[in-house]
Image (tube, grey):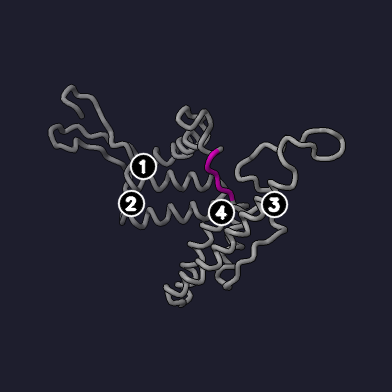
Amino acid sequence: MDEKGGLHFEVHLPDYARAYVVAAALESLGFKDEADDCRARADQGAGTPVPKDITWVDAEGKRKMVVKIPFADLVQAAPVVVDAIMNTPLQSLGGVAMSKIINWTPRRQAKVNILVETLMDGKAEIPTDKGDFFATYVAAAATLAYWGLVRNGTFPEHAAELVETNALKMLDTVRQRIEAKGQSVPPGRPADGSGKTDKGSKPSGDGSKS
């Protein structure tokens, strides 16, 4: 609160409430189990009993005004907040929504999981029948594979070396496939003998076909 009595709230929600917003985002993307886990971890971290209200007070202690909002109300509002953050076109993002720039789905996570298993087996093959794979998938898989190996008893240094070696090979494969696609039919040139120009398809998300 300023000298004129105006209210100014902390920019970020308290951690407990923020976790529920994250959970709402996960659920909206199709990750219900992960959303439930996020809420459970938030409740555990908040202690017993869990807070029933979120309270704001004057940080400087100069005024006794207290703003109290029932936590249940914040939970009800979380999906609306998530929808606005993810799907509202923003000028700062070039007029598009966040979900058009950064998006993740169970289908894409399934591809990452395939790469995780491959890396943990000490291999570097990328499937050719599961749609497109991208560098972001390899990066996500490398992190999960490393922790998976360590959790299973592999010495951390050896786990890091094993994952790094094969993840780099995967990145080479991803690059080679992308380059091969780009060279198959140069943009703007006839795709066949019909004389029609192949303008290429418009990108959607990460370009995955499956």
Q: What residue does disc 3 label?
A: 180
Which residue type carries mark 2?
Val
The amino acid marked with disc number 4 is: Ala
Depth check, front residue: 132 or 170: 170
The residue where tag 4 is placed is 135
Which quadrant holds residue 196? top right
Do callouts 1 and 4 mark residues in contact (Cβ within 8 Å)?
Answer: no
Q: Considering only order in the chain, which callout, 3 or 2, is on the residue closer to the N terminus? A: 2
In the drawing, does residue 194 fall left or right of residue 102?
right
Which callout, 2 or 3, points to the residue nearer the camera?
A: 3
What is the CA distance from the residue labelled 2 to the residue labelled 3? Answer: 55 Å
Mark 4 to mark 3 CA distance (whole Å): 16 Å
- Name the residue rendered at 15%, 37% in the picture: 60
Eye-nearest disc, 1 or 4: 4
- Counting residues from the start of the chain, the first of labels 1 and 2 encountered is 2
Span highlighted in magenta in the image: 101-105
| Disc 4 element | helix
Element under label 1?
helix
Q: Residue beneath label 1, please?
A: 71
**Is there CB contact under 8 Å for labels 1 and 2?**
yes
Residue lying at 43% horizontally and 43% vertically, measured from the top left: 21
